Every structure is written in structure tokens, then in C-alpha cells.
Image (spheres, rainbow, N blue to C red):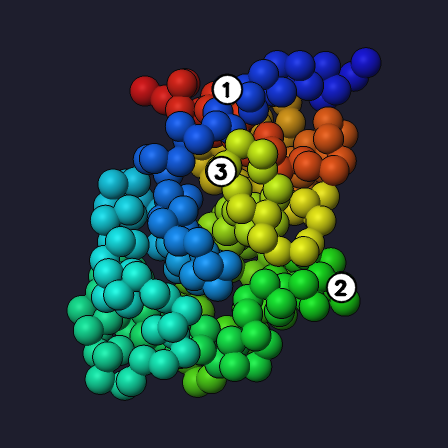
Amino acid sequence: MNHITGLKPFLEQKVREFNTSAFIENDPVSIPHLFVKPEDIEISGFLTATISWGQRPVILKNAATLFKWMDYSPHDFILHARKSELEVFRKFVHRTFNGDDAIYFLKALRTIYERHGSMGKLFEKLTEQYSLPQAVHHFRNEMFKSKVEPRTMKHIGDPLKNSACKRLMMFLRWMIREDDNGVDFGIWNISPSLLYCPLDVHSGRVARHLGLLQRRQDDWKAVEELTANLRLLDASDPVKYDFALFGIGVNSRG
């Protein structure tokens, strides 16, 4: 038994401890849990994940504001909002994500729904043709097909440019991973085995402490290394260990 596989009992226990419905309340995943319709879940999940950096209470407050302005019907709003109804988003601010970014994202999502039917259908088609990193790259190109400011493009990372894409990997976990414990939704017909682990400063610190990650930078190469090691523990559902890394990180902060 090597060091990595020797971690499995400990990490499995941590997954059981944190992959529970109690996880939802204070996590950004609580926002898409407000919805039932698959299109509402994926739109609210994507926009919430996009602004998921900084203090959690602020993320939840600002995400809730977005969907209040959509009358809690994001799919209907995306498809049918008039130009005048988009203007309220001009005053939206979450850190560097501003009103212009919000309006661009809403318009880009409308185009994706008109062309492909849903985000899920687009990703399903892309993952049939490409690896997940390449699929994310092509999804990003779909989002930014219209004329766009470079600053707006920074809000979606590109793994082919070595971005860790933490928020997008978290969103994909929500949509793809099947979860009997009610946290992740599993509403897209894509295998969870294809997922890559979300990586940020906290999960990276824990992964390095456990010997799951040697690379020092939190970039896409590190995501690949970490996920390859997690696949040694569970090739069918490697990203479930995101819960373990999160839980260990929460308990070791301070």
C-alpha cells in the first residue's frame, strides 16, 4: 500500500462527515438549492459560482440579490427579460464582478439557451467531443462570442491557459456529481469520473500537507496532479474528496 492509497480510510471518513445536508446552509450551493427546475438550478448555480470568492455571507447575500431581481425565475428571466429589465443589474457589485459583467453574462446565457437549449446540453455535447479541460475552454468561447471587455473574460478561467478554474470546477461538481446526501445535484448526463477537483489556497494547503499534491502553485497543473491522486482512491467519483479537503481545512484554519 502506497502513501496515497493509505489515506483512503481517513478521507472516506471525512467525506461522510462533511458530505451531508448540513453542509448546504452556509455554502454557496445553498443558492441553487432554492430552485427545482433544472434550468433554474444550473443558471443560479453558474452565476453563484462565478461570484464565489470572498466572505461566504457576502457571497450568499449578493447571489440572493441577483435572483431576487430575476423574480426567482432565472430561466424565464434569461430568455424573456427586456433591455429595461436588465438595467437594474447595472448597480450590481461583488468585488471585481460589476454591473456591466452581470449584464454581459445574462445576455451570453440567453444566447447559449437559444442556441443549445441549456447549459447542461451544451456541456454534454462538448464532453462527448473533448476532454473536460477542452470542454471548459470551448464553453468559455461560447460565453464570450459577442464583443466583450477583457476584464469581463477574467471571470471565467481557462484550464488551457493554466487557470485552476476553482469556481467553475465547483459548479461542475454541483451539476454533474450524483450525491445521495442531497448536496450535489447530478442533473447533467456526464460521468462524475471526468470531474477535476476544485483547488484554492485552503484545499491546496491541506492537499500538500497530506501528500496529495507536490506542485507549489495553485494552477491547472496542480489540479491535474491532485485529481490524478484522488482518482487512485476512487476513479468513479474522485471529486467527492473535495468535501474532505474542505472539512480538514475548516478545522485547521486559525
Q: Which residue type does callout 3 highlight?
A: Val
**Near-viewer residue (178 or 87):** 178
On the image, the x and y values in percent for residue 26 come to: 33, 35
Q: Earlier in the sequence, mark 3 or mark 2?
A: 2
Q: Quadrant of the N terminus?
A: top right
- Residue drawn 53% across the image and 32% down it: 181
| Labels 3, 2: front one | 3
Corner quadrant of residue 242: top right
**Near-viewer residue (81 or 56):** 81
Q: Is residue 227 left or right of residue 252?
A: right
39 w.r.t. 64: above or below: below
* Residue position for label 3: 183
* Residue position for label 1: 17
Q: In the orientation shown, which residue stands out farthest toward the front? A: 36
On the image, the x and y values in percent for residue 202 come to: 45, 32
**Near-viewer residue (248 or 161):** 248
Corner quadrant of residue 121: bottom right
Q: Which mark is residue 28?
A: none
**Residue 98 appearing in the image:** no
Q: Earlier in the sequence, mark 1 or mark 3?
A: 1
Q: Report the label total.
A: 3
Q: Which residue type does callout 1 highlight?
A: Glu
Q: Which residue type does callout 2 highlight?
A: Glu
Q: Alpha-carbon distance for marks 1 and 2?
A: 34 Å
* Residue position for label 2: 128
Q: Alpha-carbon distance for marks 3 and 2?
A: 26 Å
On the image, the x and y values in percent for residue 199 come to: 53, 40
Disc 3 crowd rating (10 Å Cα; few below 14, some 14-19, many 20+) is many
**Near-viewer residue (31 or 240):** 31
Disc 1 crowd rating (10 Å Cα; few below 14, some 14-19, many 20+) is some
